[in-house]
Amino acid sequence: MKIKKLCLLWYILTSLVFTTLPAQGAILPEQAQEVWNQLSKTAGLKGNKTLILEKAKEPNAWVSFEGSNYSIHVTKGLLKLMVQKNEIAGIFGHEIGHIKLGHYQKTVSRNLIWYLLYRAFGKDNKTTSTILSLGLALAESGFSREMEVEADDFGVQLAYKAGYNPWGLYNALLRMKKAGFSTSPNGFNSHPPTNRRLEHIKKTIKSLTGAKNTS
Ligand SMILES: [Zn+2]
């Protein structure tokens, strides 16, 4: 499979916060696929919509695409950590935001480097996963903090439009923070600090619905 462009969603996490989130559970791959189909449809993405389950324990999700066929990659770690479908919907909405807001086009040079590396080394599986990680770092580091905030807003609005509780992304971030996941050094400085993201997302949701956190 040729993967031209990728986005990795990964959060900068600093401290533990105790919240009133629902108890631990897990999202099934079939449920994630259902959410992906629904959000893609609402966003008007055409072509195949595949969900690819990645083995990694870290909670991550990213998008790859070739032409108009989009695939969402989710790690087992993410599905294990999330409890409600609206949390997955918020994360997927964020990823679709990067596509629909043209962020990949704006970071084309970095993605081109990644694509060339993938083409050069991507044939054997072991190397592919190394190169994938590198490619993801390149793709994600090409996004500015402003783009991440835009993608958050887009994700909240898209999930809401698709019929999900708009607090999903907020709760997903809180859940990751509470679980103590932090970034590796090779990466994702473009993500604003989690607390700032949470505050901004909260404002966006309130302006959208006036709703309380009901998840
Ligand atoms: Zn992002």
Image: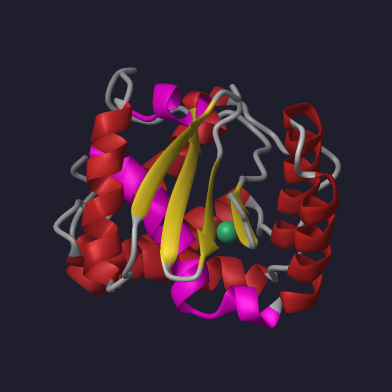
- Residue 183 placed where, x, y %? 73, 38
Q: Residue at x 51, y 24 (%)?
A: 77
Q: Number of labelled discs?
A: 0
Q: Is residue 202 visible?
A: yes
Q: Is residue 41 above or below residue 49?
A: below
- Residue 19 placed where, x, y %? 39, 31
Q: Is residue 193 above or below residue 80?
A: below
Q: Is residue 84 visible?
A: no
Asked whether, in this view, residue 166 is left or right of residue 194, the answer is left
Asked whether, in this view, residue 19 is left or right of residue 7, the answer is left
Q: Which residues are magenta?
A: 77-106
Instruction: Determine the residue located farthest toward the top in the rendered image.
Output: 24
Task: Place residue 59 in its image quadrant.
Answer: top right
- Give the dominant element type of the magenta stretch: helix, strand or loop: helix
Task: Place residue 182 in its image quadrant.
Answer: top right
Asked whether, in this view, residue 46 is left or right of residue 110, the answer is left
Q: Residue at x 42, y 50 (%)?
A: 91
Q: Is residue 208 above or below residue 196?
A: below
Q: Residue at x 66, y 59 (%)?
A: 192
Q: Is residue 157 magenta?
A: no
Q: Quadrant location of ligand 1?
A: bottom right
- Residue 88 placed where, x, y %? 35, 42
Instruction: Determine the residue located farthest toward the front in the rendered image.
Output: 123
Q: Is residue 99 magenta?
A: yes
